[in-house]
Structures are given as C-alpha cells and as structure tokens.
Image (tube, grey):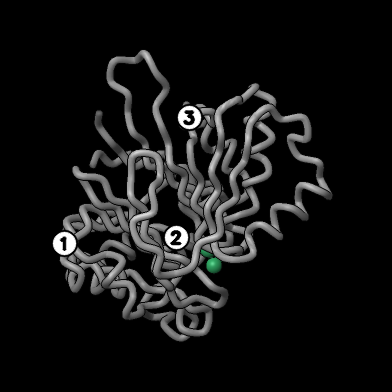
C-alpha cells in the first residue's frame, strides 16, 4: 500500500483558467492492480467531477467525501459527483462528512434536483462537531478541529499508522490550528491573500502565505503545501517568496499536483 495526495482543484472562491475549485484526494494506491485505488476526497467545489476525470481518476474509487464548510467553492460539486457515480452504476456505499447542516442541505438538493434518484448505492450523510476524535474512516482515523472562518469550518486530521495529513479548509490563523497540524507529515493550508493584503485576509477570515508558513513552523510539521490560491491577487512566486523564508520546505499546490506520503 502506498499513499499520495492528488490536488484536483486549488483555487480560492474565484477560479481561474489554471485552477478549479477546492478538491483534494487522499489516494491509497493499490499496487497489484487487482483492485481500484481508494480515495478520500477533501472538499468538492463546483466542477470537481471534471477535474477528477482530467486527472484520470475514477469517481467510483471515492469511498468518503469530507466537506470542510458550506461555501460554494468547497461544496457545490457534490451533487455532480454523486450523479456521475450513479451513471457509472456504483453499488458501493458512499460516506459524506461535514459540519452540522449537511443533512438538511443534502435533503434539499436531493428533493429539488432529484440527483441519482434511482441509485443502487447508499449515501451515509454524517454531521460532525468540531472536537471529534479518531472516528473510523476507511483505513484511517479522522479528527476534527474548529477553524476560524466567516462560517463554521472544520479542519480535518486524517491518520493511519504510516502518516498524518492535516487540512485547514478556509481559516485565519487560530489556536486550534496547531492542534490540527501538530506533528503532521503534510499540512495543506489555505492562503488566499498576500501579506500586503492582510486587511482583506482578516475581514474575510483567510490566511496569508506567511501565516501558513508560521503555522507550519509552530506545529512542527514535516511538509507544507499552500492551496486556495487566488490568481487575481497572488502568483505562485509571491506565495513561495513570502513563505519560504519562514518554512523552506513549502510547496504551492496546482491542479494535477501529486505528492507521495
Ligand atoms: Zn474557499
Ligand atoms: Zn470559505
């Protein structure tokens, strides 16, 4: 078994021609080829299904979907992914995790759009509170942390004996972030505005690349990838130069990037 992180979409709330909305896969590679890979999806923004296809990944491989919060750039691709699973004749159960309100959202979407109405697979919608510890998730253990954003947002920590992955979703720097990320092998941290736009970052409760690097340094992580890139305000070069003086092992996510764990 080997694991990797595959970035399907890496944009902030405004996408660009280079970047689709937030969608990241934790992929458990099946090396002997007799079985599909297993994928835990972190966020599912609009158009995720197409980005997943572009990465030559089957949506049938997705076992669980973790939604950090209900902003559309993180959630509105969920119905499309589920519809595609049905069209491709999925039979295996799907788990969808997210903050309180996820059941009501899903019920409304289902009632209005009739997505996958004749599906042959069960969808388990599971609402989580911040502070959940070591919930079983496929081959992993899942813990949740309360981030600080304009709406409730869960940071996810996914652990197995070989590695720890931490994902912030959208947040400004906060105390819980260190608990989320402490000792992680890989921290995936948002950074939506540069330090020169710190006022905008604070009013929208987002982070800067420098703050992401400071969080990585404080949390003693082994690697940092910055995502949720706003191409209108920041370039990859600016993100790197602002963060690497504090945390030299930083990388900037782009759609299609794969990082072995
Ligand atoms: Zn966002
Ligand atoms: Zn958001």
Q: Describe the element under mark 3 as helix, strand or loop.
A: helix
Q: Quadrant of residue 187?
A: bottom left
Is there CB contact under 8 Å for labels 3 and 1?
A: no
Percent from the top left, x then y, of residue 100?
59, 66
**As drawn, is 174 to the left or to the right of 78?**
left
Q: Residues within 10 Å of mark 3 (few under 14, many from 20)?
A: some
Q: Which residue is mark 2?
A: 229
Earlier in the chain: of badge 3 and badge 1, it is: 3
Q: Can see residue 222?
A: yes
Is label 2's Cβ within 8 Å of ligand 1?
Answer: no
Q: Which residue is mark 1?
A: 248
Ligand 2 is found in the corner quadrant, namely bottom right
Q: Which mark is residue 61?
A: 3
**Is residue 197 placed above or below 50 in the rendered structure?**
below
Q: Can see residue 242?
A: no
Nearer to us of marks 3 and 1 is 3
Is label 3's Cβ within 8 Å of ligand 1?
Answer: no
């Amino acid at each position: 078994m080997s694991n990797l992180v595959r970035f399907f979409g890496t944009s902030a709330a405004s996408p660009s021609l280079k970047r689709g909305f937030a969608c990241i896969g934790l992929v458990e590679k099946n090396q002997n080829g007799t079985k599909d890979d297993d994928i835990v999806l972190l966020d599912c923004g609009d158009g995720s299904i197409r980005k997943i296809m572009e990465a030559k990944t089957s949506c049938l491989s997705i076992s669980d979907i973790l939604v950090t919060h209900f902003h559309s750039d993180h959630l509105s691709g969920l119905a499309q992914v589920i519809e595609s699973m049905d069209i491709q004749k999925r039979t295996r159960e799907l788990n969808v995790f997210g903050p309180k309100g996820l059941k009501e959202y899903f019920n409304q979407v289902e009632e209005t759009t009739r997505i996958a109405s004749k599906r042959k697979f069960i969808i388990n919608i599971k609402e989580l509170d911040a502070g959940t510890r070591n919930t079983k998730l496929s081959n992993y253990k899942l813990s949740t942390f309360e981030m600080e954003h304009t709406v409730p947002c869960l940071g996810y920590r996914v652990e197995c004996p070989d590695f720890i992955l931490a994902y912030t979703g959208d947040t400004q720097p906060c105390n819980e972030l260190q608990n989320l990320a402490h000792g992680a092998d890989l921290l995936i941290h948002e950074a939506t505005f540069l330090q020169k736009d710190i006022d905008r970052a604070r009013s929208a409760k987002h982070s800067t690349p420098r703050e992401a690097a400071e969080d990585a340094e404080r949390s003693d992580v082994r690697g940092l990838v910055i995502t949720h890139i706003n191409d209108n305000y920041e370039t990859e070069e600016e993100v790197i130069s602002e963060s690497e003086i504090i945390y030299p092992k930083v990388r900037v996510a782009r759609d299609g990037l794969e990082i072995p764990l």
